[in-house]
Every structure is written in C-alpha cells, then in structure tokens.
Image: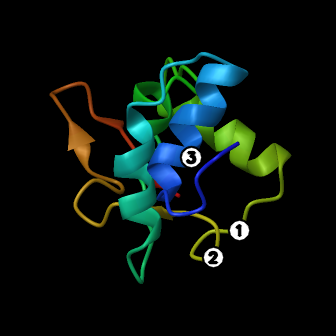
Amino acid sequence: MINSNINIYEYAEILNDKTNKIDIKFMKEFIELVDKEEFCIHYKKLEEYGAYIFKSSNIINRLLKKNNFEENIDYMFAPEASGANIGSGGSNKKEYYL
C-alpha cells in the first residue's frame, strides 16, 4: 500500500521501482519547468532526458512539421540565434524551444 501523504516525486520513484526501473533523475527538473507560467524547453533537453537524439536542428524541424506543430504556439526560435550566421561558412543555425 502506498502512503497517501507522499509527494509526486516519491510516488513516481515508488512506481518506477515497481515497473519500469528507468533513470528518472530528470523528473524533478522537468516538473519544476512545467510549474512555471511560461513553460518553454530547448529541444536539446529531450536528448538530456533520453527522449530523442537530434543530429541537427533540421531533424527537429522535420518532426515539428510532420506533427503539425505551429510556430509561436507549439514552438519558437531563440531570438538571438534565429537567422544568425554561425562561423565563416555562413550557415544558419536555428535554436528551437518547445
């Protein structure tokens, strides 16, 4: 039986120990992000959390389009990175925030 006076973190740890047994260290940070009024996460956090590996920002762009994500609703670009030239090659690097 689970104590009803435990918090969400403790509950998730107990549940994880009984079922998935995966690394959930990210959970507390993720929930703290969600608790903010404007929840916005850099797409590379998905790699940190082990959800997806991106070899380039082009991959996230394709996934966003494939899943009908809308700019400025479901994702946005970092103002300082959008359209900025990176290095002398002149390639544009977009930093996506979900």
Observer-side mark, 1 or 3, equals 3
- Please, what secondary structure does the residue beneath circle 2 have? loop
> Which residue in the structure is indicated by mark 3?
11
Q: Position of residue 12 (x, y in %)?
A: 57, 42
Q: Position of residue 80 (x, y in %)?
A: 22, 61
- Residue at 42%, 79% in the rendered image: 38
Q: Quadrant of residue 71?
A: bottom right
Cα–Cα span, label 2 and label 3: 32 Å
- Please, what secondary structure does the residue beneath circle 1 have? loop
Residue type (three-letter) at the residue carrying disc 2: Ile
| Tag 2 and tag 1, C-beta contact below 8 Å | yes
Q: Nearer the viewer, residue 78 or 25?
A: 25
Q: Where is 81 relative to 60, above or below?
A: below
Left or right, residue 69 beside residue 39: right
Label 2, residues with CA under 10 Å away: few <14, some 14-19, many ≥20: few
> Which residue in the structure is indicated by mark 2?
73
Cα–Cα span, label 2 and label 1: 5 Å
